[in-house]
Amino acid sequence: MSFFSLFQRKPETRAAEDPSWDGVRGLSGLNTTPGGALMNPRQAEALSIVSACVDRIADGVSSLPVYVYREQDGGRDVDSRHPLAGLVAHGPNSRQSWPDFATWWTRQALLWGNGLVEIVTDGAGRLAELRPIPWWLVSPQILPSGRMIYDVTDVVSIYGGTGKQRRLLDTEVLHLKDTSDDGLLGRARLARAHGALLNALLVQEFSSAYMQNRAVPSIVVTTEGNYSEEQYKRMREQLHSGYGGPSKAGRIMLLDRSKEVKVISPTAEDIELLDSRKFAAEEIARLFQVPPPLVGIWDNSSFTNSETAGRWFAQHTLGPWLRRIEAEIERKLLSGPSQRQIEFDLSGLLRGDPETRWKSHQIAVTCGILTPNEVREVEGWKPRPGGDELHGSSKQEETTNA
């Protein structure tokens, strides 16, 4: 195969030809649900629980400190001179800080199943920029050789309008995937569990229409006798104008020739509707593996189990996503004769919990794991004289060996 034939248009196998992928790729981004409705990530985000789950995971990833390490004999050191470390510190591109970039990349993978980032190098081949590419502008394909490529339609205006299509090789991009069926493309959770999402959307739509159209007076005064057609029409208009809609709920309904007074209480249907909304929210939280208290579902929650939920979230929700990001970056950007690693520091979650953080520091110093000055460095303080000595068991061990 010649060099130019690689870029010629040929009959190719598209990894997204499976109908299940119609909802997570292409410009339309539409997914046909069993009920016939069309759903895309933007519609799914209209559900507050979807936005809450996605924001919780993406913000959790972006809030963590990130370090690039260089492996050496006997351990590893932070490599602040590596180009990737510079992008983390100063921003991966001219439009985004690292937290903005990490949030965007994670949200893309959560909502679309795939997040694509172009690796931009300078004239010397060194890493210069990480450029985000929205997944709906990407057409992934497989060459006859089995190699993955990405046809990208560049947007030339923030208000619309597209430029020419260009092709990126798999070595020129970072591809973050949600769980994959074929190992090539991630499949969005919105596509995997669109039944649960559809149910939540229908419950929300029904609840909105129910509150908008229902007349909900607090007291009804009834009457005896029959109404003429004219009286019936007038009564119907009176009910609609005086009691229809949520802003008019709770008014006292007074009818002509009234004799009996009735107090209206919430019906079983009202209670069932509320329970349906709670169940739908819990289903979606389960889909994204986010503990309910972290997205505002406080039923059966307390401060004690909420703290446990936070640890569970770090280990079982953030942990797998962080490892995927680290593995993709190391495979594409840090592989080579001089081995380097990137690590998201989960201890950054303790930034808002000073008591737990300082107890951890105390244990580290007492057990001889860290010196006082190393703790001060972590906290952003200057070293103090005599603070470079280890205390506790490590110091005793060194004395014994000597």
Image (tube, rainbow, N blue to C red):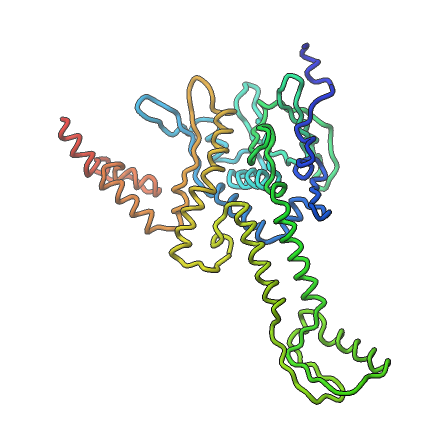
Res 136 quadrant in image: top right
| In the foreground, 1 or 264 | 264
Residue found at the very far top of the displayed protein: 2
| In the foreground, 370 or 16 | 16
Q: Position of residue 37 (x, y in %)?
A: 72, 48
Residue 136 visible: no
What is the total number of numbered labels drawn onto the structure image?
A: 0
Q: Is residue 270 positioned above or below 228 on the image? A: above
Query: Image check: 201 left or right of 342?
Result: right
Residue at x-position 40% and y-position 58%? 303
Query: Image check: 9 left or right of 115?
Result: right
Residue at x-position 51% and y-position 29%? 328
Q: Is residue 17 positioned above or below 364 on the image? A: above
Q: Position of residue 61 (x, y in %)?
A: 48, 41
Residue at x-position 43% and y-position 39%? 65
Q: Position of residue 170 (x, y in %)?
A: 59, 23
Res 149 quadrant in image: top right
Residue 2 visible: yes
| In the foreground, 107 or 145 | 145
Q: Position of residue 350 (x, y in %)?
A: 38, 47
Query: Image check: 264 left or right of 102?
Result: right
